[in-house]
Image (cartoon, rainbow, N blue to C red):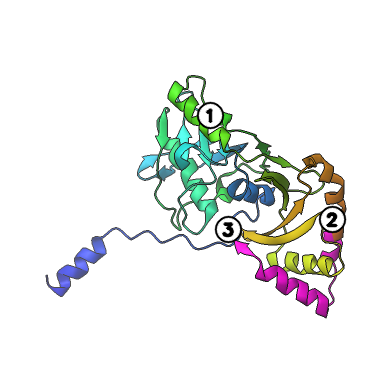
Amino acid sequence: MGKASRKKRAEGATPKPRRAPYVARPFEGLHDETDWVAMSEILPAATAPVTVVVPEGTEVEGHPVPAGEHEVTLVSVLPGAIPALHRDNGEVLVALQSRTSSGDASRDIAQAVLTALAADPGTSVNSIRPATADTPRLQDLLADGQELDVTVHQDFGFWLADDATDEQRAALEQMNDSAVPMERVDGAPSAYWCRMTGRSYVRWILGEDEDAATRAMARLQAAGEHTLGEGTELLGAFRANGLLVPVIEVDPQAEAATFAEPLAALQARYEQALTVEEPLSTDERRARDGLVSRQVTLR
């Protein structure tokens, strides 16, 4: 093929989709960012209804997406880790914890929402194409002022439709047997108690910049004010979608509600520590370094 022919062919080629850029805090700017992180990373069984607004002319994989407002139920996970489900009755379920990842969880979820809305009722969306730089983000699709009203479930019963088969019910029972008990703890915007292998923990999601949150926690730890009281221990923290999540081990015999008041006091101490502008002291730097060295990144 001659040079002129190659140039002509290149000019007529369809541009290759640009990869979605990496976003460290994909849910930044959304109401209840910390609960978006909770649903996408730590809650095994949870649901939240949202309203999305699809612009005219929107397509996904060449299929038109109905324009206008749509009610969508966000869920933590779906059977078989599928991204989404469009039920016979028109209900759309979209999982925040799925295998697809473009580097921007906001675009991934938006892609799943649009794909599910474009699918026929009664369709399981078993896979979606990776989001691209042209894929809208949740920040573009969610109705103005949309808040995230999370319901934490103790089992996966929300999976089943009224006409579920015996096989589906049997699979649900098997999943329920392995479900980790988890409850919201009042006293902070997003904190969740869970019990695993005989031990109990409170996972406390901090909504501030990760570096600022780490410094504040270091100040509290150096002052001995970083736990929920006697018999509790800060085990460390992990990073999830750009936010810091301290993990505090608590009395396994105590119920989740027991820690609401101590958590409210810890939240107040943390907010005060955020306002301190002086450089970290030697003890505070040591606490910060220890906290950072024990961090694990989930995403």
* Stretch of the chain drawn in magenta: 270-299
Q: Nearer the viewer, residue 236 or 139?
A: 236
Identify the residue under disc 1: 173
Where is residue 140? Give x, y as percent: 56, 49
Callouts 1 and 3 close, C-beta under 8 Å: no
Where is residue 30? Give x, y as percent: 65, 50
Q: Is residue 82 at all visible to an observer of this figure?
A: no
Q: Secondary structure at mark 2?
A: helix
Rendered position, 251 above or below 222 = above
* Spatial CA span between label 1 and label 3: 28 Å
> Which residue type does callout 1 highlight?
Glu
Residue at point 42%, 27% (across, down): 122
Q: Residue furthest top?
A: 163
Where is residue 295? Give x, y as percent: 65, 65
Q: Quadrant of residue 246?
A: bottom right
Q: Secondary structure at mark 1?
A: helix
Residue 30: mark in rendering: none
**Nearest to viewer (mark 2 / mark 1):** 1
Identify the residue under disc 3: 298
Q: Nearer the viewer, residue 177 or 261?
A: 177
Identify the residue under disc 2: 266
Residue at point 74%, 64% (across, down): 213
Quick one: label 2 or label 3, which is nearer the N terminus? 2
Q: Nearer the viewer, residue 83 or 133?
A: 83
